[in-house]
């Protein structure tokens, strides 16, 4: 399945958010490869540990952005309840998070050698 087909198959409730987040990830990816994993996750970049540097997936509760835990910790006050795990932010709408914060999280995560899982 292609990423485009995958995004089109996301339930309508979150499709616009998933598509917008994917577009942003592509915009900021630079030379990093973007791949659709069999689990339905979209990986951006590959760290020295063989795992993604940033990524996303759609879940029943929203669209999840995966980023380095230490980078997310820098924005802890802004993220508040959007942060659902050490490396995870849930977006139900792109407007839930200011654009400059989202850009900073993605850029800084993609600049790392590998994702930090414990920040």
Image (tube, grey):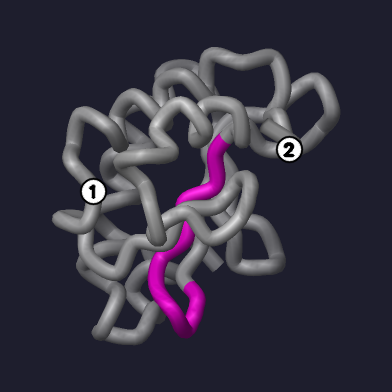
Q: Which residue is at a point 41% across and 65% down the rendered structure image?
A: 63
Pick out the residue farthest to the front. 77
Q: Position of residue 92 (x, y in %)?
A: 29, 69
**Mark 1 residue element:** loop
**Rendered location of residue 70, percent (x, y):** 60, 27
Q: Which mark is residue 42?
A: none
From where the camera sits, is residue 3 visible? no
Provide the secondary structure element on which disc 2 rests.
loop
Q: Which residues are magenta?
A: 59-67
Q: 89 left or right of 118?
A: left
Residue 38 on image: x %, y %: 70, 65
Q: Nearer the viewer, residue 109 or 8?
A: 109
Q: Which residue is mark 2?
A: 117
Residue at (30, 75) in percent of width and height: 14
- 76 vs 64, nearest the viewer: 76
In screen coordinates, is 12 left or right of 1?
left
Query: Within 10 angstroms of label 1, few (less than 14), some, or many (20 or more) residues?
Result: some
Instruction: Kindly identify the residue that appears in the image at 47 percent across and 51 percent down.
Output: 65
**CA separation in Å, label 2 and label 1:** 21 Å
Identify the image quadrant of the C terminus: top right
Please report the residue visible at 53 percent of the width from the left and 14 percent of the height from the top: 111
Question: For residue 24, which quarter of the picture?
Answer: top left
Give the number of callouts: 2
Extreme right residue here?
A: 49
Q: Which residue is mark 1?
A: 97
Residue 100: tell me if it is visible. Answer: yes
Please report whichever mark, 2 or 1, sits nearer to the chain's N-terminal start.
1
């Amino acid at each position: 399945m292609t990423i485009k087909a995958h995004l089109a198959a996301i339930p309508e409730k979150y499709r616009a958010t998933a598509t917008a987040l994917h577009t942003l990830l592509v915009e900021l990816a630079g030379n990093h490869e973007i791949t659709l994993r069999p689990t339905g996750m979209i990986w951006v970049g590959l760290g020295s540990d063989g795992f993604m540097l940033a990524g996303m997936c759609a879940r029943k509760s929203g669209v999840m952005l995966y980023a380095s835990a230490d980078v997310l910790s820098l924005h802890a006050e802004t993220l508040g309840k959007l942060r659902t795990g050490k490396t995870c932010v849930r977006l139900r709408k792109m407007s839930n998070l200011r654009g400059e914060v989202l850009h900073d999280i993605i850029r800084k995560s993609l600049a790392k050698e590998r994702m930090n899982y414990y920040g």
